[in-house]
Image: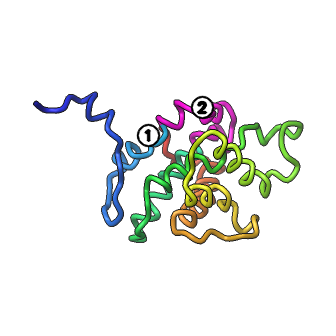
C-alpha cells in the first residue's frame, strides 16, 4: 500500500553528507527538526522577538540553518546535518528582546551565546556538538573558536544571514 502524503510528511527528513539537495529538500529537513523543538521547550517564544529588520529570531535561526546547509554542500563538507540544523535553530535561544535595553544584557553580543546554550540545555537534550554550535557561534567576539565543521558553518552562516537580513536581501522563511 503506498504511503499517503500526510504519512510521508510525518517522516523525519534527514540530509546526508556528500549529496546536493534542492532548496525545498533543505527547507523540509529544517522543518522536520523545528517541529519537535517548537512542540516542546520555548522555541516558539523566539517568533515574538525581532532579530534583524522585520525578521523574528526564529526566522533568523531558520535562515542560518539553511545557509549552513548550503555552505556545507558547496564546500563538500562531511557534517552531521541533523546536529547542525538543531544547533542553528537554537543558536540565538536567549529569549529576550535584545533591542530593549532594559530587558537586554549590557554585553549582549558576547553574553548571549552562553545564555542561549544554558536555556537550550534546560529545555532540550543537546549533544556536545550542538552545545558547541550554540556556544561558539559569535566567534571571534567570543574567545574560543569552533572546532567542528558544523559549528564553523553556523558561525559563517550567522554572519552572512545577518548582513542579508539587515540589508533586506533574500532570505528563507519557514
Q: Residue at x 85, y 46 (%)?
A: 105
- Residue 163 picture location, percent across and down: 63, 56
Q: Residue at x 43, y 40 (%)?
A: 31
Residue 44: which disc?
Answer: 2
Which residue of the protein is positioned furthest toward the left in this rendering? 1
Instruction: Say whether residue 52 is left or right of residue 108.
Output: left
Q: Residue at x 60, y 46 (%)?
A: 90
Is residue 42 within the magenta segment?
Answer: yes
- Using the image as rendered, state which of residue 4 and residue 21 is in the foreground: 4
Q: Disc 2 on helix, strand or loop?
A: helix
Is residue 52 within the magenta segment?
Answer: yes
Count of numbered marks: 2
In primary-sequence order, the first of circles 1 and 2 is 1
Gap between marks 1 and 2 measured at Cα: 13 Å
- Residue 119 picture location, percent across and down: 69, 43
- Is disc 1 in contact with disc 2, using a CB cutoff of under 8 Å? no
- Residue 121 picture location, percent across and down: 65, 46
Q: Disc 1 on helix, strand or loop?
A: helix
Residue 55: which disc?
Answer: none
Instruction: Say whether residue 137 is left or right of residue 72.
Output: right
Task: List the residue tagged with mark 1.
Answer: 31
Q: Residue at x 68, y 50 (%)?
A: 117
- Using the image as rendered, state which of residue 87 and residue 121 is in the foreground: 121
Question: Which quadrant of the figure has residue 51?
Answer: top right
Question: Mark 2 packing: few (<14 Cα in 10 Å), some, or many (20+)?
Answer: some
Q: Which residues are magenta?
A: 35-59
Question: Which quadrant of the figure has residue 101?
Answer: top right
Amino acid at each position: 500500500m503506498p504511503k499517503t502524503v500526510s504519512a510521508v510528511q510525518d517522516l523525519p527528513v534527514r540530509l546526508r553528507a556528500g549529496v546536493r539537495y534542492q532548496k525545498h529538500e533543505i527547507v523540509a529537513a529544517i522543518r522536520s527538526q523545528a517541529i519537535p523543538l517548537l512542540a516542546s521547550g520555548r522555541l516558539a517564544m523566539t517568533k515574538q522577538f525581532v532579530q534583524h529588520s522585520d525578521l523574528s529570531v526564529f526566522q533568523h535561526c531558520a535562515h542560518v540553518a539553511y545557509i549552513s546547509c548550503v555552505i556545507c554542500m558547496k564546500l563538500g563538507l562531511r557534517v552531521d546535518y541533523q546536529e547542525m540544523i538543531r544547533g542553528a535553530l537554537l543558536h540565538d535561544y536567549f529569549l529576550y528582546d535584545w533591542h530593549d535595553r532594559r530587558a537586554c544584557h549590557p554585553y549582549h553580543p558576547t553574553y548571549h551565546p552562553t545564555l542561549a546554550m544554558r536555556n537550550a540545555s534546560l529545555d532540550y537534550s543537546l549533544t556536545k556538538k550542538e552545545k558547541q554550535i550554540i556556544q561558539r557561534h559569535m566567534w571571534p567576539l567570543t574567545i574560543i573558536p569552533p572546532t567542528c565543521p558544523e559549528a564553523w558553518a553556523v558561525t559563517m552562516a550567522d554572519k552572512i544571514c545577518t548582513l542579508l537580513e539587515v540589508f533586506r536581501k533574500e532570505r528563507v522563511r519557514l
